[in-house]
Amino acid sequence: MADRLALFVDRDEAGRRLAPSLDRFRDSDPVVVALPRGGVPVAFEIARLLAAPLDILVVRKVGSPFRPEYGVGAIAEGGFREIRHDEVELTGIAAADLDAVIAAESAEMERRRRRYRGDREPLSVEGRTVLLVDDGIATGGTAVVAARALRARGAAAVILAVPVGPPGVERRLARDFDEVICLEEPHGFYSVGQFYVDFSPVSDAEVIHLLELGRGVPASRVAADPPPDPVPGERTIEIEPEPNVLLAGDLRIPADARGLVLFAHGAGSSRRSPRNRKVASQLNRGGFATLLIDLLTQLEAGERDNVFDIGMLTGRLLAVTRWVQDDAELRTLPIFYFGASTGAAAALRAAAHVGSDVHAVVSRGGRPDLAAESLDLVRSPTLLIVGGADWQVLALNEEAAENLVSCRHQVAIVPGATHLFEEPGALDLVAQLAAEWFSRFLTAHS
């Protein structure tokens, strides 16, 4: 059910799908302004693809002192304030109580502004077109206040751009924006999060990182993942799975290696993924060699269809496996697969094809459902690791596990973890579980 509800894998994918609808603004020198925190990953992809600068606008709802979820206004950085005084009078809120709420929200807004932007001034919007971006819209109240704050700063036009909203949202907000662009207006809308597979909270650290990358940086210089820190003993290799296609990988072989783990990363990531690199480092300490490989070239990875082409990813992973089996240094090592997101589906399909030469498979926050037609053919022992708070992906993994009828398998839940396992200790537990699973199956399985 979760997969049928979801329209977007995550905010990154939503941004890449939304960007083509905004391409006509490219020549108008736009500024992309995100509503933090959820709107920042969406806006980053738009800014990257349009080669436009990225900024944020911090807005805080002013709630009733007695019912904080009931909004009576909003404030935005730069001193902009809008209070619906008729609502204040209707609910009988005393002036002193309202002032206290505004003071508290102002303090939080200032904390976030300094946290995200530091001492830098916001980008100028004077006379420019602003693309105001969020990860979705429900009532639109916060976005409307943001638009008014931007116009107060001299914006020539404010375009609201969101991946998803309730039916009729474009018409309902037409008078508040120069244009409203909403990709999807599904029936049965009750929250933005229901239409994402991964709707994990966006951390302050991610907001800061994306703003640093996107603030006036040309698209050609922006990478999906930051360059990794150098690792002693790591070397870059290139594999040609087909003519004129070179795949880059990072190979580490510890002394007395007892197995080799091939990493297949997921949508929107690369071999530089700090999450997979952290897991790889811990596996290296446990005596496993690791190969983090990009199954798509940089140009191919920019096309969304390729990222979800499980057949192509599987074929590339099989080519990498054959390369390992032919390599004089690596061919004696037992082979294991570690897949994340869509990479997990490719790992399972490849394991079904290779058979006993793949000693075990581990999936981290994976999409095994995308390998549904191959699950009953997988004979490699398979561990599906999922965050306990990643409920939609957890449901997909539990359903997929029921179809792993030809192999030993287990669903391991990391308590409280979201899709990216950013919570303290979550990735350490993932690495521990993976190392234990691989160690159990170092000898060929029956």
Image (tube, rainbow, N blue to C red):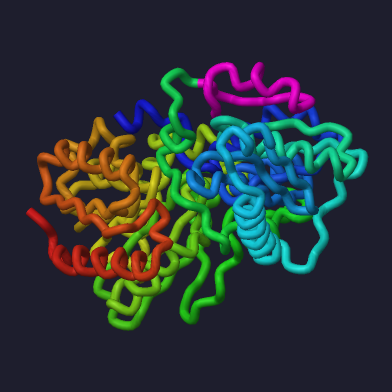
Above/below status of 216 relative to 172: below
Above/below status of 238 relative to 278: above
Q: Name which residue lies at 55% across and 29% down.
A: 164
Q: Position of residue 318 (x, y in %)?
A: 35, 47
Q: Name which residue lies at 34% across and 57% down.
A: 417
Q: Is residue 175 within the magenta segment?
A: yes
Above/below status of 379 relative to 16: below
Left or right relative to 242: residue 402: left
| Quadrant in which the N terminus appears | top left
Q: Is residue 181 within the magenta segment?
A: yes
Q: Name which residue lies at 48% across and 20% down.
A: 186
Observer-nearest of 224 and 21: 21
Give residue 115's quadrant in the image.
bottom right
Observer-nearest of 175 and 41: 175
Read off the magenta span.
164-185
Judged from this view, the residue extending furthest toward the right is: 127
Q: Position of residue 135 (x, y in %)?
A: 57, 39
Give residue 372's quadrant in the image.
top left
Left or right relative to 289: residue 39: right
Left or right relative to 214: residue 201: left
Observer-nearest of 15 and 408: 15
Above/below status of 108 relative to 242: below
Whether residue 106 is visible here, answered yes or no, is: yes
Give residue 257's quadrant in the image.
bottom left
Observer-nearest of 30 and 329: 30
Q: Position of residue 204 (x, y in %)?
A: 57, 61
